[in-house]
Image: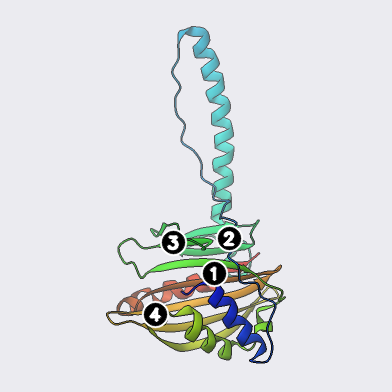
Amino acid sequence: MRSTAATSRSLRTASSGAARRSGLVGERSSARRHGSERGGALVPRAHEGEESNNRAMASEESDFTRRQALSLLAMSASATVAGGEAQAKIPAGYSAVKNVQKGYAFLYPFGWQEVSVDGAEVTVKDIIEPLESLSLEILPTNKESITEYGEVKPLANTLVKQVLVPPTQEGTVLSAEERENEGLKYYTIEYTAKAKNFTRHSLTVLGVQKGKLYTITTGANERRWPIMKDKLLFVAKSFTLL
């Protein structure tokens, strides 16, 4: 994916034509993902003497109670992903991400690892198949709906040509669809990016909520698309704005 500045320029062009500019601000969201809830492991403390033992045991019991509560909270939070398509018990083979503060939730294939990528809100990938990954980016916008950027098919062509596919690769739009979930509209773009030695098959979902433009992209090597297709389509459909 190209730079955020390129994203902003292309969306401005697609939403208002050559004669007008939109108000999209091309800045990376500087806020980092948080809200990942994990229960900590209980670590025994060293004890010296009976009095020290009693204090330590009481402290450990208190810690254990708090950690039990946190673990239950984490289990409860990870058991469901709020909203629309993602509001269900996590299916086998998937992990969940939910950030109420930043307004998004989605599923991704179990076993993918989170990695740090400059400018991305969340990035997870398969460590064995590097083209199998998911990345979420958030940009500020003055739009109230993704539809204000234009119809899905023209926008898809613009983004694939100018933003989603590197200039050294050949991008081809395969499909572009609009869906609605709980009053919010999403655009889903399916496309390929052909490089010299490989072709990546990708899905990008875009949505707007509360002054933010969300762009989530997942994909796989074209040779593995028949294997990953159903999983990645499910991942794309699970993306929900809260």
Q: Which residue is identified by label 1?
A: 238
> In this image, 62 relative to 126: left or right?
right
Identify which residue, 85 or 139, lies in the foreground: 139
Kind of element beneath mark 4: strand
Could you give the CA–CA distance between mark 2 and mark 3, rounded to whole angstroms?
A: 17 Å
The mark nearer the N terminus, 1 or 3, is 3
Q: Are marks 2 and 1 in contact (CB under 8 Å)?
A: yes
Near mark 3 (Cα within 10 A), the count class, few <14, some 14-19 or many ≥20, is many
At 45% across and 60% down in the image, what residue appears?
Answer: 117
Q: Which residue is identified by label 2?
A: 81
Is residue 214 among the parts visible in the rendering?
A: yes
Near mark 2 (Cα within 10 A), the count class, few <14, some 14-19 or many ≥20, is many
Q: Quadrant of residue 242?
A: bottom right
Amino acid at pointer 3 = Val
Could you give the CA–CA distance between mark 4 and mark 2, rounded to whole angstroms?
A: 26 Å
At 60% across and 56% down in the image, what residue appears?
Answer: 31
Residue 201's label in the rendered image is: 4
Q: Which residue is identified by label 3?
A: 124
Residue 28's label in the rendered image is: none
Q: Quadrant of residue 84?
A: bottom right
The mark nearer the N terminus, 1 or 4, is 4
Could you give the CA–CA distance between mark 1 and mark 3, rounded to whole angstroms?
A: 15 Å
